[in-house]
Image (cartoon, helix red, strand yellow):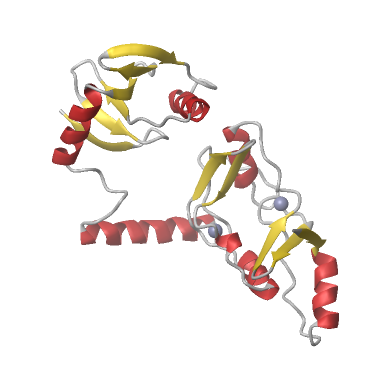
Amino acid sequence: MKLTRAANWFARAAGQEGGTPAQTPLPCPHCGGSNVVVECVPGLCLTQCGDCLVSARTEEEAVALWNRRDGRPSVSRDPLPCPHCGAEAETQHAGGWWANCSEGCLEKGKTEAEAASLWNRRITVAAAAQNRDDSRNLAEKRGASGKAKLGADKLLAMWNEDKDGEYIMVNDDGSAHYVAHDTVMEDIPKMNGETFVGIREWMNKNSFWPNIWSVNDHGNVTLRGHKGQDLGGLV
Ligand SMILES: [Zn+2]
Ligand SMILES: [Zn+2]
């Protein structure tokens, strides 16, 4: 793979490809910089910011880098929607922490021009939130959504299987444990004071992703997502 400075690329595109001027890339929506690079292999071109292609030491740092808009920091601790397409963002750990668009929208350009126009799409946070609400409302109306809470039967079956097997238990006080066969095997420490950051770190470290259940003093259980989302509960 070869990295080409955008300036060189556009000069080449204009001079050697029939003089058709490519779209001028907009500055990076995250850092506001113009160090935009184009990376091409046959059949696939990516337009990305050369200053934002760095991993972070922590997930929080990766989210903060992603959440910058035109260089301005955001107060949101959750990843903001993708500034290009409005899809939700996700974080991953691979040699360091990264935040990226869950739709992989910068990986679909088949030509340089397509990669540039994908990069140049801009959506506001408010518009992305509206799109997301619209699609959730639609999914709820249809009664079928992967994001919807699980039904009681499904939850009960999952809990019955997990409680005799392995799972992560979160208590009312935010402490967490890895439980196997009714026995607490290991305490899972919080990270940066956050229960679920600690749990994700523990899961990544062990390459093991059991279900997470909150168990309260009354014995009610709630299935939780990796970021603490309530996926449905049993009373
Ligand atoms: Zn950037
Ligand atoms: Zn996107």
| Residue depicted at x 61% and y 31% | 58
Drawn side of residue 235 relative to residue 69, left or right: left
Q: Find residue 4 and report its horizontal and vertical position in percent.
A: 81, 62
Name the image quarter holding residue 159. Answer: top left
In the depicted structure, whether residue 29 falls above or below residue 14 = above
Q: Does residue 171 appear in this view?
A: no
Point 68% across, 69% down: residue: 42
Does residue 151 appear to the left or right of 187 in the view shown? left
Q: Position of residue 2 (x, y in %)?
A: 78, 60
**In the picture, residue 215 is in which quadrant?**
top left
Classify the position of the N terminus by image quarter.
Answer: bottom right
User: How many numbered discs, if any?
Assistant: 0
Q: Position of residue 19 (x, y in %)?
A: 81, 86
x then y, percent, for residue 34: 78, 58
202 or 141, which lies in front?
202
Q: Nearer the viewer, residue 3 or 148?
A: 3
* Quarter of the C terminus within the rendering: top left
Q: Give the vertical position of 218 relative to 32 (above or below).
A: above
Residue displayed at 70% across by 48% down: 53
Residue 51 vs residue 132, the one in the foreground? 51
Task: Tell me: residue 18, above or below residue 233.
Answer: below
Q: Is residue 4 visible?
A: yes
Write down the quadrant of residue 3 in the picture.
bottom right
